[in-house]
Image (cartoon, rainbow, N blue to C red):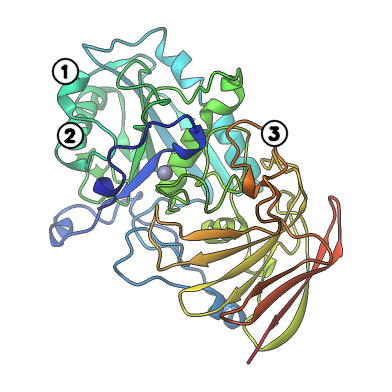
């Protein structure tokens, strides 16, 4: 399980190497006992896809816990339309809430819902609710729950969720919500500077049941992602959209080495520092890009594609070049705008997506157009080397093993770019 893999997160001065992580609970035979048919377990509906995009809908093998494959498997929350998020603020006898619970909630809202509205081009209408406006006091000290980085759901988290349900149930109808955010008092557990405890259990059908439904998509947020740079008020909320994106089925892109695989190009890679967006692949996977906004370059020969910046609504956004049933290359345009706040070299980003690589192991790898440049960003907690990874007119990405070539033939600045894809037969 990923818990043992990630356990004992390194203490490092490079905050970018620290991020929250996910545990997607495996489904065992006993899951059938539970109510798999609840609203939260319905999962994204596989849309009828045009045959032209079929080769680009890569899929991982069944052993992958949380895959980049399309469509996303069942059990996760829907990422389009109205999503109701229940927020519960909890504290402990040995870590009593400081200040009001609603002030703690306000560290995450309204920015989180705005982040989702912007990133989804208005397709995700995120509705946070806090029916319990005070701290929910847990019956046991924080230490007794055994919450540490990498802790599995059983037994610690199950005990905590049981106690949360007991405390909240008189005031909450859990059937009203698609996802649950447990926001702990920041003085419970270590500082996020030392160890990030924040975690999501997604698609977990064996979670405790409340009002007849399992709390199968639940995010837990601890401490404060405050690097001391004075930007906490603008950037500290970003752990929550990261965690919630797990409930929609997105894997972690950072690895044990930090953000070196995907840099700051996706909030599933780095959720510290300046605002960032999701990659086009993730937006397509979540249903925020239509099929008609994606070109699938699956045939041998040469094709041209005109792409607009991903941060703007409408138009063609991504070309995908499948190289097998499980992997391929994506190309898309990034300029500064929307949630893409730290772009310092606009251009065409090229990255490999591998649906057979699991969460936390680098399922997406960005190709660096300017290797060993040191990058163009001065923004703290932004992976520097990949900050100038985008290709500009005249540059070509080549994969010698498959013969795929992606050239930027035209474009520049903040406008559209023309991309030529060639692949052999
Ligand atoms: Zn994560």
Q: Which quadrant is home to the C terminus?
A: bottom right
Of residue 389 and residue 357, the one placed in the foreground of this image is 389
Is residue 12 rendered to the left or right of residue 278?
left
Residue under label 1: 139
- Find residue 75 and report its horizontal and vertical position in percent: 33, 56
Is residue 287 rendered to the left or right of residue 342?
left
Of residue 333 and residue 261, the one placed in the foreground of this image is 261
In this view, the mark in front (1 or 3): 3
Q: Earlier in the sequence, mark 3 or mark 2?
A: 2
Mark 3: few, some, or many residues within 10 Å (few <14, many ≥20)?
few
Of residue 253 and residue 278, the one placed in the foreground of this image is 253
Q: Earlier in the sequence, mark 1 or mark 3?
A: 1
Does the image show residue 97? yes
Q: Earlier in the sequence, mark 2 or mark 1?
A: 1
Does the image show residue 127? no
Label 2 to label 1: alpha-carbon separation: 14 Å
At a point 58% along the width and 81% down the height, the residue shown is 402
- Helix, strand or loop at label 2? It is helix
Quadrant housing residue 137: top left
Quadrant housing residue 97: top left
Is residue 127 rendered to the left or right of residue 165?
right
At a point 66% along the width and 40% down the height, the residue shown is 339
- Helix, strand or loop at label 3? It is loop
Mark 3 beta carbon near ligand 1 (under 8 Å): no
Q: Quadrant of ligand 1?
A: top left
Mark 2: few, some, or many residues within 10 Å (few <14, many ≥20)?
some
- Find residue 315 and report its horizontal and vertical position in percent: 76, 61
Mark 1: few, some, or many residues within 10 Å (few <14, many ≥20)?
few
Residue under label 3: 378
Residue under label 2: 156
């Amino acid at each position: 399980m990923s818990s043992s893999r990630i356990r004992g997160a390194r203490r490092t001065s490079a905050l970018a190497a620290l991020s929250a992580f996910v545990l997607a609970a495996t489904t065992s035979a006993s899951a059938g006992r539970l109510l798999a048919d609840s609203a939260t377990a319905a999962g994204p509906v596989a849309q009828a896809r045009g045959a032209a995009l079929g080769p680009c809908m890569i899929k991982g093998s069944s052993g992958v816990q949380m895959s980049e494959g399309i469509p996303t498997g069942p059990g996760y929350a829907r990422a389009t339309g109205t999503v109701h998020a229940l927020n519960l603020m909890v504290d402990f006898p040995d870590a009593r809430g400081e200040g009001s619970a609603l002030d703690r909630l306000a560290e995450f809202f309204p920015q989180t819902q705005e982040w989702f509205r912007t990133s989804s081009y208005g397709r995700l209408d995120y509705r946070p609710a806090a029916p319990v406006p005070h701290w929910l006091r847990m019956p046991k000290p924080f230490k007794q729950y055994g919450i540490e980085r990498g802790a599995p759901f059983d037994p610690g988290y199950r005990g905590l969720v049981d106690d949360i349900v007991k405390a909240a149930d008189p005031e909450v109808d859990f059937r009203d919500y698609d996802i649950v955010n447990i926001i702990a008092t920041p003085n419970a557990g270590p500082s996020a500077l030392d160890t990030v405890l924040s975690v999501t259990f997604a698609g977990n059908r064996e979670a405790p049941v409340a009002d007849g439904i399992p709390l199968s998509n639940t995010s837990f947020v601890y401490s404060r992602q405050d690097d001391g740079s004075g930007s906490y008020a603008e950037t500290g909320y970003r752990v929550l959209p990261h965690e919630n994106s797990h409930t929609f089925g997105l894997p972690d892109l950072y690895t044990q080495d930090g953000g070196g695989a995907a840099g700051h190009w996706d909030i599933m890679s780095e959720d510290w520092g300046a605002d960032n967006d999701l990659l086009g692949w993730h937006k397509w996977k979540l249903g925020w890009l239509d099929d008609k906004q994606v070109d699938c370059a699956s045939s041998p020969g040469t094709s041209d594609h005109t792409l607009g910046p991903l941060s703007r609504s409408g138009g063609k956004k991504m070309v995908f070049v499948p190289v097998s049933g499980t992997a391929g290359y994506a190309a898309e345009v990034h300029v500064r705008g929307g949630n893409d706040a730290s772009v310092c070299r606009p251009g065409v980003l090229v990255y490999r997506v591998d649906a057979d690589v699991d969460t936390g192991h680098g399922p997406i790898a960005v190709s660096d157009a300017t290797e060993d440049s040191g990058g163009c960003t001065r923004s703290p907690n932004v992976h520097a080397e990949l900050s100038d990874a985008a290709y500009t007119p005249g540059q070509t990405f080549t994969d010698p093993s498959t013969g795929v070539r992606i050239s930027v033939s035209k474009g520049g600045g903040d406008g559209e770019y023309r991309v030529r894809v060639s692949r052999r037969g």
